[in-house]
Image (cartoon, helix red, strand yellow):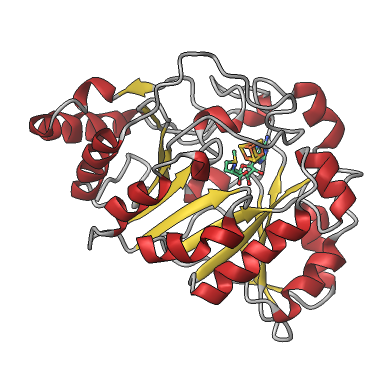
Amino acid sequence: MLVDKYNRSFPYLRLSITEVCNFSCNYCLPDGYKKTGAEHFLNQDEIRRLVDAFVELGVWKIRLTGGEPTIRKDFTEIAKMIGDRPEIDTLAFTTNGYRLKERAQEWHDAGLNAINVSIDSLNAKKFHAITGHDRMQEVREGIDKAIEVGFKDVKINVVLLKGVNDDELDNYLEYVKDTPVSVRYIELMQTGDNLTYFNKFHLSSDTVKDKLLAQGWVENIRALGAGPAANFTHADYAGSIGLIAPYSKDFCTNCNRLRITSSGDLRLCLFGNVGIPLRHMLHNDDQKGDLVAAISKQLDYKASSHFLALGDTGIMTNLSSTGG
Ligand code: SAM
Ligand code: SF4
């Protein structure tokens, strides 16, 4: 297992397979994804070699992300290739849900067993205004389908936005009353691109925490090796609420993940200042030893924390480019 000098272990890899996205979320790609002409994302062989190396290093959870990962024509094939590996216990993906209703069964059959769907508002008009797409109902139906086909872990990502969706906690609570999903409020993060937006819309998730505690929700003790989210449950509710607060004091203490960008750079931290190119070690299967050694060595350089509170967002311009 990969362990760094702060005694954090890394069983979890977030693998971005594309930067392309069809949505234009205000906080991420407000003008939509603009083709650069240089799109040359990891191919299936490269992904397989990466997965091989990370499995050897003890990774048992992989999340496919992007951009919008399901936009790739070979998304199901990629999932199947990873899902067939017995060492991978959890194969997750994060999606805006635009094809979920039609494809949930196919993706589950391919081996995906955990899913995060972004749905920043349960109000159709607001959802449209945030994402640029009038598709809230369709995405919700996709979530129902994911539950129906047997995804064992269904999470809903909600980026908390001051004055936009911070009045919707009751709607999400009503939703999780009978629906066995975890709604995860993510604090808006500053990126290289969104400073003005961030200053206007960032809100601490403490506001949500206070309301939950006042209504009898209980913060669960974090399981060993669990990620940075704080989870809240309530006996009367089928679902749960999670809070992801990257600006909180101990957020990085629980870091358990590494990232690979869609062009094959290793990122030790979402907000780090370097990307370590691995692609030149993905040309053939014989390079596995070098690849494993390079990844292990880089862990020595993983910092104890990000410097977000100082406004240092590292080299990340937006989350679609790094893999959210
Ligand atoms: N396209 C997929 C989606 O939206 O679910 C996957 C990629 S997206 C970058 C992953 C997650 O990052 C989404 O839940 C999105 O809402 C979140 N995200 C993007 N930019 C963010 C930001 N600046 N602060 C907080 N969360 C952000
Ligand atoms: Fe696309 Fe996801 Fe970014 Fe929204 S958050 S623009 S869906 S990559």
Outermost top residue: 37
Outermost bottom residue: 236
Say which of 179 and 203 sits in front: 179
The answer, for residue 225, to whether it is visible in the render is yes
Which percent across, then down, holds residue 186?
68, 49
Which percent across, then down, holds residue 67?
55, 35
Is residue 144 placed above or below 36 in the rendered structure? below
The quarter of the rendered structure image containing the C terminus is top right
At a point 62% along the width and 27% down the height, the residue shown is: 318
Residue 235 in the figure: left or right of residue 173: left
Say which of 61 and 86 sits in front: 86
Outermost left residue: 286
At a point 54% along the width and 14% down the height, the residue shown is: 36
What is the number of callouts on the image? 0
Residue 77 in the figure: left or right of residue 201: left
Residue 113 in the figure: left or right of residue 276: right
Residue 200 in the figure: left or right of residue 55: right
Say which of 248 and 320 sits in front: 320
Which percent across, then down, holds residue 231?
62, 65
Which quadrant would residue 21 be assigned to in this image?
top right
Say which of 244 and 87 sits in front: 87
At a point 48% along the width and 66% down the height, the residue shown is: 105
Which quadrant would residue 310 be assigned to in this image?
top right
Which percent across, then down, holds residue 79?
36, 52
The answer, for residue 221, to whether it is visible in the render is no
Which quadrant would residue 33 be assigned to in this image?
top right
At a point 26% along the width and 44% down the height, the residue shown is: 51
- Find ligand 2 in the image and state its quadrant: top right
